[in-house]
Image (tube, rainbow, N blue to C red):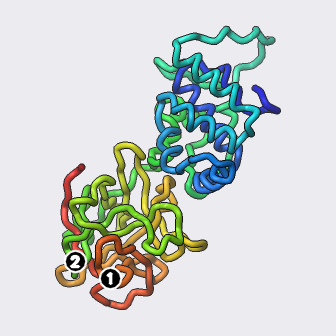
C-alpha cells in the first residue's frame, strides 16, 4: 500500500495487475467517467471518458499520457511519477523485488486468489472491490472471490456488462412480433436512409456523445445490437472496436435529459418495450415516453424521448444488420 492507503503501482508485476490498480484508483476516487473527464479538463488534460473506459477494460498497458491525466485527476500530480515509473518498468520487462516477508497469519481469500498466467491479484485491488459501492455508469462486480477472479482475468470492463447475469431469452410474444435481435439497423420510418448511431447534439449544448441518426453508410462503428431481456423488453448495446461495449441509457437530469446516452453500465440501460405498429415498431419506456426523431429527419438529427403520441417520428424500421 502507498499514498495513505492508496494503490502502490510499484507492486504491479504485469500489465494486467497495473491496470487493476489503475481501476482501483478510479473507484476509490468516487468519480464517474464523466466527472473524470470534466476534472481533467479543468487541469488542462484531455481525458475522454470512452478512452478511459476502454483502457481500464483491457489487460494492456495504457498510454503514458492517459495514465498521467488519470492519476493527476484522481490522486494529484505528486503521484504521477510513481505511476509512470512503474509503467516503464513493466514495459521493459523488469520484475519488482518481492515484498518483505510478513508474519504468518490466516490467509484471506483475496490473498490466495490467482489466475493462471497473470499471477496473484494485488491485495489493494481486492480490497477496493470488496468495499466499493455500485455507481451510475460504473460496472458493479460480483462480490467476494468471484469478483476478484473476474477482475484479474478480464478486468472490470467499463464498457461491457460482463458482470451481469445472463439475460433470459425473448418471450414467445416478442418472437411472434418478428422483432429482430442481435446486430440491427434502427431506421426512422420516414427516413430509411438514416440509422441509429453515435454523434453530438446539433446545438452543442452537451459535450459527450448521444444517440443520433446518420446515413447508414456512416453509422458503423459502433455496431448497434438489440438485446432481448424477456417479455418483449430490450436494451440497445453499442460495440466499438476501440471504445468497447456499452448500452444506451435515458438520463433523467442534466443537459442530457431527453436524449439517449451511451453508458458503460449496462445494468442502468434504458429498457425499451418494442411494439409492432403496422410495418414499423415503437420503442417505449415504462414511464410512457417513446423514442423519436428530434424534428425533421436529416443527417445528424438526435434521437429523443418524448411522450408517446403515435406520430410517424416515433416509428422505426428494425432490420438485421452486419458487423462493421
Residue assigned mark 1: 314
Residue 157 at x, y percent in the picture: 49, 42
Residue 79 at x, y percent in the picture: 73, 32
| Mark 2 residue crowding within 10 angstroms, few (<14) / some (14–19) / many (20+) | some
Q: Nearer the viewer, mark 2 or mark 1?
A: 2
- Could you tell whether 54 is left or right of 39 in the image? left
Residue at the spot 67% in from the left edge and 38% down from the top edge: 71
How many callouts does the rendering have?
2
Dividing the picture into quarters, in which one does residue 6 lie?
top right
- Could you tell whether 233 is left or right of 256 in the image? left
- Could you tell whether 203 is left or right of 12 in the image? left
Residue 200 at x, y percent in the picture: 43, 66
Mark number displayed over residue 191: 2
Q: CA distance from mark 2 to mark 1?
A: 12 Å
Please say if 159 is above or below 292: above
| Near-viewer residue (46 or 311) | 46
Specify which label sits upstream in the sequence, 2 or 1: 2
Where disc 2 sits, the SS reads: loop
| Mark 1 residue crowding within 10 angstroms, few (<14) / some (14–19) / many (20+) | many
Residue at the spot 52% in from the left edge and 19% down from the top edge: 91
Amino acid at each position: 500500500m502507498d499514498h495513505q492507503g492508496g494503490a502502490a503501482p510499484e507492486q504491479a508485476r504485469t500489465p494486467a495487475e497495473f491496470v487493476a490498480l489503475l481501476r482501483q484508483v478510479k473507484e476509490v476516487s468516487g468519480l464517474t467517467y464523466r466527472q473524470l473527464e470534466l476534472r481533467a479538463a479543468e487541469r488542462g488534460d484531455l481525458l475522454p471518458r470512452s478512452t478511459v473506459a476502454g483502457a481500464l477494460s483491457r489487460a494492456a498497458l495504457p498510454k503514458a499520457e492517459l495514465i498521467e491525466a488519470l492519476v493527476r485527476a484522481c490522486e494529484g500530480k505528486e503521484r504521477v511519477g510513481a505511476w509512470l515509473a512503474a509503467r516503464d518498468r513493466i514495459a521493459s520487462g523488469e520484475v519488482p523485488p518481492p515484498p518483505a516477508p510478513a508474519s504468518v497469519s490466516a490467509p484471506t481469500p483475496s490473498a490466495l486468489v490467482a489466475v493462471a498466467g497473470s499471477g496473484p491479484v494485488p491485495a489493494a485491488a481486492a480490497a477496493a472491490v470488496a468495499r466499493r459501492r455500485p455507481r451510475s455508469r460504473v460496472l458493479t462486480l460480483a462480490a467476494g472471490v468471484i469478483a476478484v477472479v473476474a477482475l484479474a482475468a478480464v478486468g472490470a470492463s467499463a464498457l461491457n456488462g460482463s458482470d451481469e447475469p445472463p439475460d433470459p431469452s425473448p418471450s414467445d410474444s416478442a418472437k411472434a412480433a418478428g422483432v429482430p435481435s442481435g446486430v440491427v439497423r434502427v431506421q426512422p420510418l420516414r427516413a430509411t436512409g438514416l440509422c441509429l448511431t453515435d454523434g453530438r447534439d446539433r446545438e452543442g449544448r452537451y459535450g459527450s456523445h448521444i444517440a443520433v441518426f446518420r446515413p447508414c453508410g456512416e453509422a458503423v462503428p459502433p455496431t448497434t445490437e438489440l438485446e432481448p431481456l424477456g417479455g418483449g423488453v430490450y436494451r440497445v448495446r453499442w460495440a466499438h472496436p476501440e471504445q468497447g461495449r456499452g448500452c444506451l441509457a435515458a438520463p433523467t437530469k442534466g443537459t442530457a435529459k431527453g436524449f439517449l446516452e451511451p453508458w458503460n453500465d449496462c445494468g442502468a440501460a434504458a429498457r425499451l418495450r418494442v411494439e409492432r405498429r403496422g410495418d414499423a415498431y415503437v420503442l417505449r419506456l415504462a414511464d410512457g415516453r417513446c423514442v423519436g426523431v428530434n424534428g425533421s429527419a436529416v443527417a445528424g438529427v438526435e434521437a429523443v424521448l418524448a411522450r408517446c403520441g403515435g406520430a410517424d417520428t416515433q416509428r422505426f424500421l428494425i432490420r438485421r444488420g452486419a458487423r462493421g
